[in-house]
Image: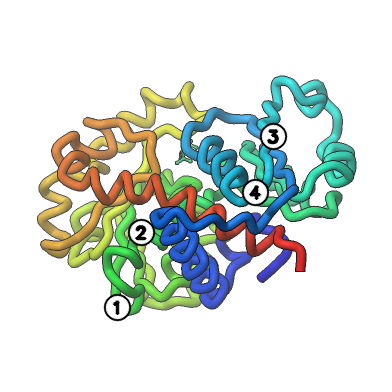
Amino acid sequence: MEKHLLKMADLTQQDITDILNLADQLKYDRQHGIPHRLLEGQTLGMIFQKSSTRTRVSFETGMYQLGGNALFLSSRDLQIGRGEPVEDTARVLSRYLDGIMIRTFEQAEVESLAQYGTIPIINGLTDYCHPCQVLADLMTIREYKGQFDGLKMAYIGDGNNMANSLIVGGLTAGMSVSVACPDDYRPHADVLEFAKAYGDKFTLTTSPEKAAENADAVFTDVWASMGQEGEAEKRRIAFKGYQVNDSVMAAAKPDAMVQHCLPAHRGEEITAEVFEAHANEIFDEAENRLHAQKAVMVKLMQKK
Ligand code: CP
Ligand code: NVA
């Protein structure tokens, strides 16, 4: 495994299997009261330039459960918010911390932290991708379905950070992936290029029903991501019809699961009925953020 987790493409199929196996073990330990203080005495810095409920709480709690400590560093309070270069921040924080999780806008900022720092960097969401979320999603699919081979993942909605990471993660794990999005909101060109190597295991369409056909897991995400609040009205029009509803679910396999990274907007990308019918899977997915990220931290930060 590489030294950092900057995007899903940093992981091989074997890396994903190793992370998920450890995550399953850590989840088992937690459910049985077995301590696992694998990062005793270590400190994770958590830089947030955007809001968060799940990422912040799961990383902070996870670090505590691993015997370490986590620092919440809002960009509003850091000198980075007043213009101190990320290159300098990386070199300073590397002298104090054992790892950094960062949530920000530009993927380039995360790459710079990794380039200039000397400690592991974990991407906690950028406009480009959300690898921690997708590891939790893969963990949940494996829990429910037992394996990835022969499964079909469908994603309906914006070709955003979640779409980008799901495509790369789903294909790398061994699933086929089908995405439905409006032509003007396609996934990132790099991701479409990545998917080309998988031939007909990847399909891109404008039809939600077609994408969902025979799917084993149906994903969606918000129409307007963090930072796009000003486009919300325009996007409500562009994404009309890109909704996980009964008609989309009727196209999927009868036992298809539904996943949503949350927060969800009922009545927009998903109906309240479909959300509630699949709430167990969706909140298992949210819980698995904790276990999957603990596994990532152990893999990247545990002193050999
Ligand atoms: N899914 C997710 O990353 O949630 P938060 O924005 O609450 O961290
Ligand atoms: N696409 C969403 C995901 C939130 C977890 C966003 O970036 O806001």
Q: Viewer-nearest of labels 2 and 4?
A: 4
> Is residue 227 found left or right of 77 in the rendered image?
left
Q: Amino acid at mark 2?
A: Thr
Q: Is mark 2 within 8 Å of ligand 1?
A: no
Residue position marked by numbered label 1 in the rendering: 150
Residue position marked by numbered label 4 in the rendering: 67
Q: Residues within 10 Å of mark 3 (few under 14, many from 20)?
A: some
* Residue in front for this viewpoint, 200 or 34: 34
Q: Position of residue 90 (x, y in %)?
A: 83, 43
Q: Amino acid at mark 3?
A: Leu
Q: Are marks 2 and 4 in contact (CB under 8 Å)?
A: no
Q: Is mark 1 within 8 Å of ligand 1?
A: no
Q: CA distance from mark 3 to mark 2?
A: 28 Å
Query: Which quadrant is the C terminus positioned in?
Result: bottom right
Residue at 34%, 45% (x, y): give it: 260
Residue position marked by numbered label 2 in the rendering: 140
| Lower position in the chain sequence, tag 2 or tag 4 | 4
Q: Quadrant of residue 263?
A: top left
Q: CA distance from mark 1 to mark 4?
A: 39 Å
Residue at 66%, 44% (x, y): give it: 101
